[in-house]
Image (spheres, rainbow, N blue to C red):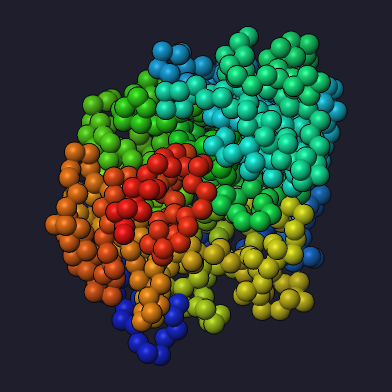
Amino acid sequence: MSDDKSPRPAAQQPTAEVSEAQIAVHWPEEAYFPPPPQFIAQANLTDPDIFARFSLDKFPECFKEFADLLDWYKYWETTLDTSNPPFWRWFVGGRINACYNCVDRHLPKYRNKTAIHFVPEPEHEAVHHLTYQELYVRVNELAALLRDFCGLKAGDRVTLHMPMVAELPVTMLACARLGVIHSQVFSGFSGKACGDRIADSESRVLITMDAYYRGGKLLDHKEKADIAVDEAAKAGHQVDKVLIWQRHPGQYSSATTPVEGRDVLLNERLRQYRGQRVAPVSLPAEAPLFLMYTSGTTGRPKGCQHSVGGYLAYVAWTSKNIQDIHPEDVYWCMADIGWITGHSYIVYGPLALAASSVVYEGVPTHPDPGRPWRIAEELDVNIFHTSPTAIRALRRDGPDEPTKYHHHFKHMTTVGEPIEPEVWKWYHKVVGKGAAVIVDTWWQTETGGFLCSTVPGIHPMKPGSAGPAIPGIHPVIYDDEGQELPSGSGMAGNICIRNPWPGAFQTIWKDPERYVRQYYSRYCRDPQSKDWRDWPYLAGDGAMQAADGYYRILGRIDDVINVAGHRLGTKEIESAALLVPEVVEAAVVPVSDDVKGKVPDLYVSLKPGLVPSAAIADKVAAAVVDEIGAIARPRRVVVVPDMPKTRSGKIMRRVLAAISNGQDPGDVSTLANPEIVGSIRDLAK
């Protein structure tokens, strides 16, 4: 535990003169935890002058340091082209290939080093250790098939609908080798969702898998491919080929019969390409590398287009200096490659640095909550990266499990949403055994990589806070009227980034108007300007900056509940509820109120074996009032047996909000536990 006794800044009190966006944040500041000396001794970045090197007066040439981590066929001529704002172009004139940088260039030194540790969910199956040489061979053979059998070339799109298996990064890298733009769709998404994305990206080829393990079951995945192809056809787009990986090579594990003339079993067809080699295609730095469709979209899917050069430079630098990845490290990001975290920090970032990256197939708590720590112990993982959702689940199901295993992490990352201080402290003390440094990162699908985080070898950690901006990123917080809030004021507003950066997405696929409207128009000073200073990027998140310069992210702007003019971050209320020992999960949703506009409803689930009671509900409500104030008192606390969750474990707050507001929660069939919705509705009556 930290022995820092520095006083916490007092919460600023709202007055009648300040705007809605300036209402003070009530969650108190936590004390610092210093990074361990043994971590600092081996850290990649310990030079505090890094921030001076990346000051705005050094922009954009400072980002040469990012790009110099890569090998280029041709060096760039222009670091940043701002001639068509806000469509920024990085390292213009440079030529590069992402697959070469993640595979080929490591062979002379790391040929026999493991690139990917594939851990199957069934514990009786052996871990597959794929060396950089084996990765090189498999990527080349698949690239030859994609080029010669499928007729794919640079600029074509391919949709991947694949689970967490070693074949997924192999497939991504084979596409990148050819300059083919890949669009990986999270395996938990339905066939219809996949079909919508196929149609939007106009992919002629779908690459999938027959089946995969999750929660102890071998799930039929190929059946979704047939639905996806049909849905794409309804939208007017024809898929020529469906390539099917076999979960068990030589054995077809789906009950869905392959369609003759369209479906191809990859494991069998690849035999024809044994030993073939394909030269990496030299691509312009600004060529697209992949499309990543954001989740939860309504209407037309939103495909974020990321570049080869800028994106790869950004994830390589942040992997090296924020996650402190060295080639000798064994690194495990327990996210899904179907999301941007997996692209940036399972595949492209770690492999660009010649790290060993773990890919785990299944559920972290299967067959029991000790599974992650057994994996970490067996593989000697020393960098661990996961989400607050997963951390809360592991804390709920096995709070003492990490103490039973001999794993030792030097570094732990949390990503995806703000993490409550109490959960952070468990992560630090129990999972990290008090010896690991933690980076609580803030970023988005659109940003490509981390925006805010402590630099682990320089900054002390602060629970509940993402930390300062990383070098080269210059945030600003605006109120709803466009006024800049003073730095370190502790006032809540809308966080933006003043300057472009290499990892930022280039546009929304086939919808540039939406790209400008959603991310740049609101705070643009002059739509005719070609000066990047006039085009701040709107992240869509609420945030505040404490007096020490650390940022706290309050969740999406629409996740901030306006109660009688007070902006209350849902994470503040949820964090207060989690201080109650009986509570393991909490979710706040806004409910319409005739007097106050919105009031919070608070849903909580309890530790296993505890019986719900009015006394516990009252205790939770009291904790919220104690931590934040009477203004945040929930309208009601509903104790539920479980939260409605997606397959990836995320709480579906929209379902809870619909129940609280007496509305239809809509289609819940894609939830991991759709049966829980009826139970919650009965409890909330």
Q: Is residue 260 above or below residue 532?
A: above
> Which residue reaches farthest bottom?
17
Q: Is residue 311 visible?
A: no
Horizontal and vertical percent position of residue 638: 27, 57
**The quarter of the displayed image where residue 32 is located:** bottom left
- Is residue 294 shown to the viewer in this render? yes
> In front here: 570 or 10?
570
Question: In the picture, which quadrant includes the C terminus?
Answer: bottom left
Q: Is residue 573 above or below residue 233?
A: below
Labels in figure, total: 0
- Residue at 54 percent across and 46 percent down: it is 318
Tell me what residue is drawn at x 62 percent, y 69 percent. Answer: 536
The residue sitting at 39% across, 32% down in the picture is 364
Q: Residue furthest left?
A: 615
**In the picture provided, is 641 more to the left or to the right than 169?**
left
Q: Position of residue 538 (x, y in %)?
A: 58, 67
Residue at 72% across / 72% down in the picture? 531
- Residue 226 x %, y %: 69, 30
Q: Is residue 204 left or right of residue 170?
A: right
In front here: 60 or 423? 423
Q: Viewer-proximal residue, 561 or 550?
A: 561
- Residue 513: horizontal and vertical position, in percent? 74, 64
